[in-house]
Structures are given as structure tokens and as C-alpha cells.
Image: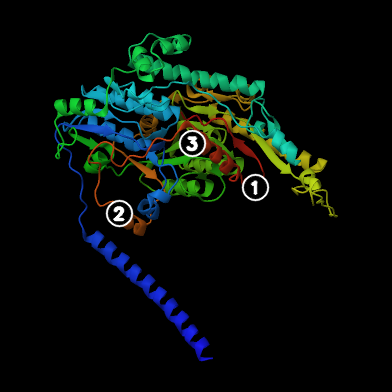
Amino acid sequence: MKGIWALIKSIGKFIQGLGSLAVGLFVLIILAVAIGVNQPEKLPNVPDGAVLVLAPSGVIVEQTALPDPFAAALPQYNNQPPQVSIHDITTALKRAKSDDRIAALAILTDSLWGAGPSHLHTIAGAIGDFKESGKKVYAISTAYSQSAYLLAAQADKVYLNPAGNVLLSGYGSYPIYFKSMLDKIGATVNVFRVGTYKAAVEPFIRDDMSPAAKEANLAFLGGLWDQYTSSVENARNMEAGAIQASFENLATDFAAVNGNFGEYAKQQNLVDELAARITWRDALAEEFGYNDNGSSFNQIHYRSYLSATQGMRETSKNKIAVITAQGNIVMGEGPVQVAAAETIVDYIRSARENSNTKAIVLRVDSPGGSAFASELIRQELAVAQEQGIKVIASMGPVAASGGYWISATADEIWAAPSTITGSIGIFGMLPTYENTLDKIGVHSDGVGTTPLASGFSPTRALNDTTKMLIQGSIENGYDEFLSLVARGRNMSKEDVDKIAQGRVWIGETAKELGLVDHLGGFDDAVKAAAAAAGVDDYEVAFYREKIDPFDQLLLDMLNSTVGIDGIGNGQTSTITKLLQKTEGLQESVEFLTTLNDPQNRYVVCMTCEVRQ
């Protein structure tokens, strides 16, 4: 008995010790945080004559996810792709243009994971605007992906490592189709849709892309490719059509340089010099001086520069509220990675109830999602308009289907020429598994008081009454979509229907069709919002998720210094094409888990994401 009691006491002391350890660790964290709070913030210094290093590390997005202090402390266990704010990049370039301390710009894209076409063209335009100051721009990457090269092409001089490459492959859309697999497991995919070109459900009912989808996809991808090649050709002083023509002689020209990618890029006038890192380091150091420790040229990373120039922000009591809808549109609340209806509605309500809000800019980068959630967001914007607040929609890389739904009744719609939009259509999809269960000897049977008692059971085939209700709801939803577009764009429903049918358009074409009012970027939309509100003096106020104060303190402790001492430090490795495809497949699967519309009606474009 004494032995048992001793064992119990030992266990008790062990548990007590764990508790004391936890309390001790908690006290240490609190003390460390307290010390951190009392320390003045140390901002980086902007050296005179410095080269601003634009080195985006990750995927370029509208809004970055909130940082996780524990992921920051243990980065080796964090497999999420890093994110970069498009607004941080453009703001840094805008400030640096008129900053006499910045002498030049160096573009380093080795850690760029990808970006939507309109984000790339926006950054390219910002680089071009920077060059108008007379300051030189250099591209100094080891190799260039298609996305990265659009930025590099804007430089006055493009360096490429002799072992590197510039691979321009064009734009393509090659979804994965599941019909045969679903047939093998006996799944019945019940599809209800309206729109000739509404191809979102095709992967579940076909093994290939339909002719209608091929027609629509090739049209908008061709438009994006024309914009890409034109931008590069203009920047590199090439003849119009030179890039597309190069594919005709690709085999011959590549063989002529013995399969050397670097030599081929130089032959095609894509780069100016093949040089190892030490070469361009020394060249820039000779022109702009060395950094403090003499290890590289005089430089400042753009993120450090943003921190150092916080005082250059404009302030005013007049606010242009920016509400961002990014990612799949879903019901409920959620983080910035998704356009969660309740979260966005709360932001809109807060903005319209703020007496300093003079206008709202709805910034959209979304392929759509729940029709119900989309309508909730649009309704709250309509309330703001009823209060006399102008609403300007600004379309980013994608504003299709539900992304267009929430924009349709704005006072003005602005889109980039390369925005992917339209996809005005609707569908419902309910898979049932009665045949799958039959294969393994499992069956469902019973009774109900109405035809709908078992109408939505995944274990039973849909009956005719259920199918009639769903199809009727989908047709009603399409009519509702047409009606709100017609009302918002001052068009007839018949004219909207002709350009709807689920077809995808690029912004340039959407402008011609009347689906958008103006072509321009985010800054253009903000200026339009201020003009509509009749204010000249204003400040942009982003409504976004705020980091927990305790998390922020932990992050400040982990990141006690701001900036990068030299190029190469703090960079993440570039992922391969295979990994990019894997990420895309994972995103597609995860998207299916977010389909939470209470009426099972979806306005979504699953082929609208184009990242290269």
C-alpha cells in the first residue's frame, strides 16, 4: 500500500513540476515582452545614394495573412508559402521615386513564387514610373520565371547568371478531370447549371475540356499573352510579335547555341549580360559605393525602406475606405485568405458608420464562391450607397462570377486590362453515393412523410422533386444575376445574357462589352473614389484583420532588427514547377471544402486563377 501511495505522490510532484515549469515559462515570456515594450523601436537607416532592392519573397497577393509568431520561431516546420503585399511594393517604388537618398533600383526575383497577371503589370508599371525620375533600374536575378521576367524586362540592364535561364512558355489552362475515377467508385454527380460556358463543374462530369470551354479559355488566355508579350517587347525595344515568332524557330535557334539556355536568352535579346553574382555586385558597388561592411553594394531592401519612411505617409481626416474581398467567397467569418461574408459585411458596416468615410473602394481578387454570401456582401454595399457613400469597385487579378456579383452594382467599376472577370453564370452540384455503397454491399432504405424527406441524402439517388427544386433555384439565381448586372451597368437583361453564359473575359474586353466602366489600377480607383466624394485631401484606410497585440510583441522580439544586410540573406528558395502544380491541386481540393452555400448555389470560376 505504501508503495502505491509513494507512486501516487511521485506522479503528483511530477505534475506539479510541469505546472511550475509552465508558470515559469509564462513569467519569462511576460518579462521579455515587458522589456520589449520599453525598448524604443529601432528603424533602419536609408543610406545616401543607396540602391533600393526589390526582392519579393513569396506569392504576391492583395492582403497578406497575419504572421504566426510560432511559425516565425520555427520556420523549418512551416510549409505555407510566404506572401507579399502588392501595395507594399508599389508604395515603396512610389516613395523611392522622389527620395534623393535612393539612387537606383535593383530587381531580384529569385524568390518570387508567382503573381496574377494584373499584379505583375501593376508592378511593371510602377517600375516604369520610377524610371521617369531618371534613376537607373537593374535586374540581377540568377534566372527568370515567366512572371519574374515581365518585371526584369523593365530594367535598363538585365543580368543573367551563365547557368541560368529565361523560360517563356505562354499561358495555359489544363485542369484535372475526375469523371472516370468517380465512375469507378460509383459516385453520381448531380449537376445543375445555367450558362453555355460555365465550365466550373466540367472536371466532375467530363474527362476532357468541352469545346465551349476551350473556345472561351483560349480567348482570354490569348488576350493575356498578347498583353504580356507587348509589354516585354516595348520594354526591350523588340519588334512587335518577336516573342511569338521566336517559337517558330525555337528548335533551330536552341540547337545553334548547343542547348545553352543563357546564350539562347542573350541571342533572343531577353538579357544584356551573362554574369555571375560577383560581376554585378562589383559593377553596382563601383557605381553606387559599398555598404558599411564592404560585402556588397550600397543598398536597402524595400521592406526596410518602407519601415524607414513611415513618416512619408499622407494623413487626413477624410478617409477613402478600402474593403478587400480576396479568395473564395464563403459564408460566415474567416481570415484574409478567404472572402468571408460576415467578416466583409462587418468591415463595410464599420466604414459606412464612420463619419470620416467619404467613399468606399471594394478591392476584389476573387473567383467567386457562394451565391448567398456574394449577395450578402453586395447588399451591405447597397446600404452604404443609400447613405450617400459612393462605392467604387477595383478589380485585381481576378473578379469573376461571385467576384463580379459583388461588384456589379457599384457606382463605378475599374479593372486592369489583364483582370480576369465575367463568368456570369451559376451552378449547383450534389454528389450522391448510392452506387458506391452498393459496390461494398451497403444500402439505404426507409420511409418519409414528403418527397423531400430523403431528397438531399448522399446515400440515395436524387428524386425528380428534388431535381426540379434545385434546377428551378439555379435558373432563378441566374435570372437574379442577370438582373443585378443589368441594373448596375444600365443594360437590358437580354444584352447581359448575350455576354454572360458563364463566359470569362479579360478586363480589356470587358470594358468594350460594358461590364466595366474604366481601365486602371488600384490608385486610379482610389482617385476616382475621392473625385466622386468631392474631396481633394484624403487618406486611404484599409479595413483588415488586426494582429493580436501579444502575437505582435512576440514577433517584435523574434525580429529585433529590420532589414537585410545583403542580397541573399533572408530569402526563400524558388519552388519548382512540380511543387507549384502540387500547391495548385491542393488549393483546388481545399476550395471544394469551402463550398458552404445554404442553397447549394455557386457563382465561381475554377479556371480563372492564372499564376505563372
Label 3: how many Cα within 10 Å (few below 14, some 14–19, many 20+): few
Q: Residue 396: which quarter of the image?
A: top left
Q: Residue at x 68, y 29 (%)?
A: 207
Q: Which mark is drawn over residue 579?
A: 3
Report the Cα–Cα distance between label 1 and label 3: 34 Å
Residue at (15%, 40%) from the top-left corner? Answer: 293
Q: Quadrant of the N terminus?
A: bottom right
Given residues 538 and 13, the one toward you in this image is 13
The residue that disc 2 covers is 558
Element type where label 1 sits in the image: loop
Q: Position of residue 30 (x, y in %)?
A: 31, 66
Q: For numbered disc 2, what is the local secondary structure? A: helix
Q: CA distance from mark 3 to mark 2?
A: 29 Å
Compared to residue 567, the image places residue 518 above or below, namely: above
The image's colour scheme reads: rainbow
Cβ atoms at labels 2 and 1 below 8 Å apart: no
| Residue labelled with disc 1 | 598
Q: Nearer the viewer, mark 3 or mark 2?
A: 3
